[in-house]
Image (cartoon, rainbow, N blue to C red):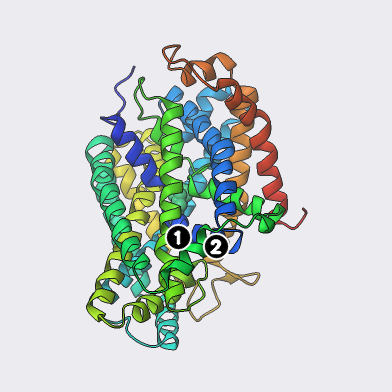
């Protein structure tokens, strides 16, 4: 083996990679989708998508990264023998890079809401809270500053390296996140009338599960597991020879599902207890929930303050661990390809992402100079990365691992060079060769209304 940086422990591998997976996607999209689309029935479909699609894709990226021991672009290049496949690696790095900037903006909003919870700016009627979010997100300065704070924090972690930076931060942040989550779930489920919310989320209604729901669950599972952004491949290049790729992927998938379900148990009981309809996306987190917290805990307002503070703290942590993994993709790329130190590589990424983030944030403002074809720059980034680059990268990666690279190499990685039994290898191969590419293609066509 070479002297490449490694994660120091098995726990570090799981927590860092689960940190990438657990992010805003778990909190602002999953609960809503589950509630609207058949509750427990949706959750079962989702778990199926994670098992047969998300986990095989994750293992495939692990195989590429650990075999190549290099950043994502170089990893595909090493395995592609000069063919056009190497472009898929670049696509991964580019997708990760572009997302970093706009993900930082949303992460910055969470920080502002921590601040607003502390100074009591979130107390008011629903109209006030809506106005508060609109004024804040359209402000030319504040959101940019918070995005910079988020990126500099990420930069700080990244510049300390893999074991002392990423791994250590994940070991601290992930357990904290989990504790916060449990505290808020407990508080939410103890509210009067919370049972109806739990029922809404967990009552299986198989009638609601149709093609749209299935494809929605699939798309969500890819985003939530950080597939096709270069993150998994880059992290896997720091795994040791002894890391069991399959069991790691399964554990990370389970953690990601568990957090998503707990997020639902945090949101719906509280929303139902005050009779507010939960929404999805930014308006759920930044408009609906502050109202819910205000009303649900109105009898003891101190509890409302604390819960709101804990909630935005939780979101910021979830966002931070994802941002770290996104930043690392480009940092590894620049430092290895330009032969510069990790610190210098990290600066290139931080500064350029600040610029991207600033433009994305400004595009939400009053002036329409940063709007193109009816979409803001922010929405374009979201659309191009999430709906075009992600499926394209995932699809091509499956074909690459399933059909192009030698099967022996895949098996060696899967079984740690024959030292593991390699259970389910055939199932894995079948998923990567057939099930995953076909399903990704369907999601892609569905997004554009073809299906
Ligand atoms: N998985 C993260 C989430 O659920 C998003 C993300 C995507 C993070 C890609 C890193 C890379 O929010």
> Callout 2 environment at 10 Å: few (<14), some (14 to 19), or many (20+)?
many
Give the residue displayed 41% in from the left and 32% down from the top: 248
Give the left or right position of residue 388, taking residue 2 as reference: right
Disc 2/disc 1 C-alpha distance (Å): 8 Å
Give the residue displayed 42% in from the left and 39% down from the top: 252
Give the camera-side residue of 442 and 247: 247
**Quadrant where the N terminus is found in the figure:** top left
Q: Secondary structure at mark 2?
A: helix
Q: Is mark 2 within 8 Å of ligand 1?
A: no
Label 1 sits on residue = 264
Q: Position of residue 278 (x, y in %)?
A: 50, 71
Q: Which residue ends up furthest to the right in the rendered image?
A: 450
Label total for image? 2
> Callout 1 environment at 10 Å: few (<14), some (14 to 19), or many (20+)?
many
Give the left or right position of residue 224, taking residue 152 as reference: right
Q: Quadrant of residue 119?
A: bottom left
Q: Which mark is residue 35?
A: 2
Give the residue displayed 22% in from the left and 77% down from the top: 302
Q: Do the residues under discs 2 and 1 have CB atoms within 8 angstroms?
A: yes
Q: Is residue 256 above or below residue 25?
A: above
Q: Secondary structure at mark 1?
A: helix
Give the camera-side residue of 75 and 177: 177
Q: Is residue 76 above or below residue 345?
A: above
Q: Earlier in the sequence, mark 2 or mark 1?
A: 2
Q: Which mark is residue 127?
A: none
Q: Position of residue 31 (x, y in %)?
A: 49, 60
Give the camera-side residue of 407 and 290: 290
Any part of residue 230 in sight: yes
Any part of residue 97 in sight: no
Q: Is residue 101 above or below residue 164?
A: below
Q: Quadrant of residue 168?
A: top left
Q: Position of residue 316 (x, y in %)?
A: 33, 60
């Amino acid at each position: 083996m070479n002297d490449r940086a490694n994660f120091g422990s098995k726990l570090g591998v799981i927590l860092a990679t689960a940190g990438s997976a657990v992010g805003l996607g778990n909190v602002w999209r999953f609960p809503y989708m589950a509630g609207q689309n058949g509750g427990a029935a949706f959750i079962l479909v989702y778990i199926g998508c994670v098992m047969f699609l998300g986990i095989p894709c994750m293992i495939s990226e692990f195989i590429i990264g650990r075999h190549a021991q290099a950043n994502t672009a170089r990893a595909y290049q090493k395995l592609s023998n000069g063919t056009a496949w190497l472009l898929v690696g670049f696509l991964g790095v580019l997708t990760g890079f572009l997302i970093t900037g706009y993900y930082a903006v949303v992460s910055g909003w969470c920080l502002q809401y921590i601040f607003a919870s502390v100074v009591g700016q979130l107390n008011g009627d629903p109209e006030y809270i809506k106005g508060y979010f609109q004024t804040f997100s359209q402000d030319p300065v504040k959101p940019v500053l918070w995005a910079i704070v988020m990126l500099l924090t990420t930069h700080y972690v990244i510049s300390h390296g893999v074991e002392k930076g990423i791994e250590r931060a994940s070991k601290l942040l992930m357990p904290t996140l989990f504790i916060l989550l449990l505290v808020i779930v407990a508080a939410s489920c103890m509210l009067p009338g919370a049972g109806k919310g739990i029922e809404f989320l967990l009552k299986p209604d198989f009638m609601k599960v149709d093609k749209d729901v299935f494809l929605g669950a699939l798309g969500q599972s890819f985003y939530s597991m950080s597939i096709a952004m270069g993150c998994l491949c880059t992290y896997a290049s720091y795994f040791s020879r002894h890391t069991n790729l399959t069991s790691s992927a399964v554990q990370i998938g389970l953690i990601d599902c568990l957090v998503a379900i707990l997020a639902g148990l945090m949101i719906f009981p509280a929303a139902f207890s005050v009779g507010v309809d939960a929404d999805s996306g930014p308006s759920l987190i930044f408009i609906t929930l502050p109202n819910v917290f205000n009303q649900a805990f109105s009898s003891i307002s101190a509890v409302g303050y604390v819960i709101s503070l804990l909630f935005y703290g939780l979101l910021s942590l979830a966002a931070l661990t994802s941002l770290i993994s996104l930043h690392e993709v480009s940092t590894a790329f620049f430092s290895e390809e330009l032969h510069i130190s990790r610190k210098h590589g990290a600066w290139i990424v931080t500064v350029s992402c600040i610029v991207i983030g600033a433009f994305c944030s400004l595009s939400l403002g009053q002036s329409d100079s940063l709007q193109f074809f009816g979409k803001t720059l922010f929405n374009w980034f979201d659309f191009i990365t999430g709906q075009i680059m992600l499926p394209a990268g995932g699809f091509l990666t499956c074909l690459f691992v399933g059909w192009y690279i030698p099967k022996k190499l895949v098996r060696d990685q899967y079984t740690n060079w024959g030292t593991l039994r390699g259970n389910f290898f055939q199932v894995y191969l079948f998923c990567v060769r057939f099930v995953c590419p076909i399903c990704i293609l369907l999601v892609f066509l569905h997004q554009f209304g073809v299906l």
